[in-house]
Image: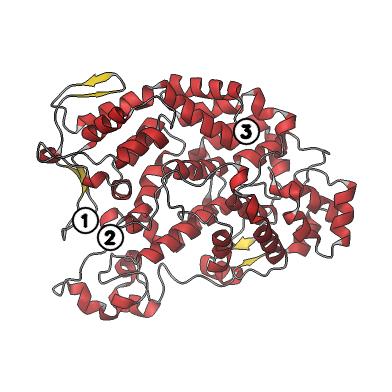
Amino acid sequence: MSVTRRQFLVAGAGAVVAAGSGCGPVKESAVEARRWLGKPTAPPLVGAMTPPSARDLDEVSHVLNRITFGARPGDHARVTVVGVKAYIEEQLAPQKLEDWLCERVIRHEFDSLADPEGTLLPRKGDASDPLQALFPAMKDKGARVSHLYEYKDKVLLDDLTRATVLRAVLSERQLYEVMVQFWTDHFNIDPSKAEAKWLKVADDRDVIRAHALGNFREMLRASAVSPAMLWYLDGRANRRVKPADKPNENYARELLELHTLGVHGGYTQRDVMEVARCLSGWTVRDKTKYFKGRVEFHAWEHDGGPKRVLGVDIPAGLGASDLDRVLEILVAHPSTAKHVAEKLCRKFIADEPPAEAVVATAAAFAASGGDVPTTLRALFATEEFWQQAGRGGKFKRPFHFVVSALRATNAETYASKALVDYLVRLGHAPFRYATPDGYPEAASHWQSSLLWRWNFACALAGNGIKGTSIAAVELRERLGGDDGLMATVLGRWASEAERVAYHESGSGLALLLASPAFQYC
């Protein structure tokens, strides 16, 4: 049994013990999910369901392919009415979009995701703690260790993974969710390392999700002092107490190589060491009973001498402000604008990002001081983004493929272990990448996963994934028959060869989901 803080405070100790799951075991069916939430776990199909009718991917299907995790039935009709430019502007302002179903699911099922750092971390049981008497059996069961506010790391990873999948499937704020994944890879943290097992939950919420469509400079600052990042890249061990002490350069190197300038951004080993000196003294409270997980700056462990980073002098005596001075230098450097622009153009345009689009995107990034919506607006205004030749030319990463299949079929899902296991087998389960560079974007990394994609398509179409189901007959009827279903899944009118294969295969929907046309966006 696991017990949430909300249950304890609202129901009282006795009622909680009898109530059962809080973070809870995975619900095994969409029927149980509906009963528990009072709402279906797929958005209702409302409004016009008019499918795409063009023979090639039109602008609407192209935009839905690239800036979302895939079109749902009816999305093409709605965006056609709104207009693609207006739809992009809607997505660039996610705070204005109503997202009641997604918010309701996350709020009710994943209590752990709202907890602050100190209530997530493990610590040794205290015999004098009155909660021990109330919950003596909690030590080895459910989500907590030996204290009400402490979670087992596996439960936190499961909660964070399932919530990530459900947000991608359910949210109306699709570009925001796409950018959350983009920045999660950019500032990648492997939660299997030390205290990051518990602290990645807070990093996802307070760093990535808080700034995904905000300002890059603010996100970079939040990441630099994220307790999860300080653990993952050893920033917490970067200290200079004695003159002979050398700084720990792990985070400084990745800050320059991955987070800002890029591997060819013009920095030297001397710059790495100087940045490490600037960042010395930042740590995470660990071996303590109170305020565990709190980030602190210890002036007595900081190298307070003068530094020189990328040709810019940083005077002695700035203390904690050395961090902000370094970040100002890095964000303003043209290599950072170019590096971020290249990654964004690779994400939204092509694996080999076109030079003209990179230049325009980098210019917007630099002029706006790293404002993410402004940068994306410039990218989406480039000719390269809209070119007909590039439409349907990007190979979907496995997470995108799985989520787009769920969205295209309006699947009801609870993101059960059975569904997540497919992402594990496909090599793209969230928060499982071990190195700081994050999951690759290029198709070459993912093309060995085709067999498991086919297995997933067959299982989904045949309602063979526990906790996930498709009402295929009702969906087909709502879309006006087989032609409408094919057009909705493919984002365009099916070719004659595709229609013949669909009808002759004996499993037309599975064939559509496994087809080359659906593998690309």
Answer whether residue 415 is visible to the viewer in this image.
no
Q: Which of marks 1 and 2 is nearer the N terminus?
A: 2
Q: Which of marks 3 and 2 is nearer the N terminus?
A: 2
Q: Where is mark 2, residue-wise?
A: 121
For label 2, the SS is loop
Few, some or many residues within 10 Å of mark 1 (<14, 14–19, 20+): some
**Label 1 vs label 2: CA separation?**
7 Å
Q: Where is mark 1, residue-wise?
A: 292
Q: Do the residues labelled 1 and 2 touch (CB within 8 Å)?
A: yes
Q: In x, y percent, where is residue 135?
A: 26, 77
Q: Do the residues labelled 3 and 2 touch (CB within 8 Å)?
A: no
For label 3, the SS is loop
Question: Which amino acid, mark 2?
Answer: Leu
**Label 3 vs label 2: CA separation?**
40 Å
Q: Do the residues labelled 1 and 3 touch (CB within 8 Å)?
A: no
Q: In x, y percent, where is residue 291?
A: 19, 54
For label 1, the SS is loop
Quadrant of residue 78 in the image? Answer: top right
Viewer-nearest of labels 3 and 2? 3
Residue name at image x 17 percent, y 24 percent: 306
Which of the numbered marks, if any, corresponds to residue 349? 3
Q: In x, y percent, where is residue 41?
A: 58, 61
Few, some or many residues within 10 Å of mark 3 (<14, 14–19, 20+): many
Q: In x, y percent, where is residue 427?
A: 55, 56
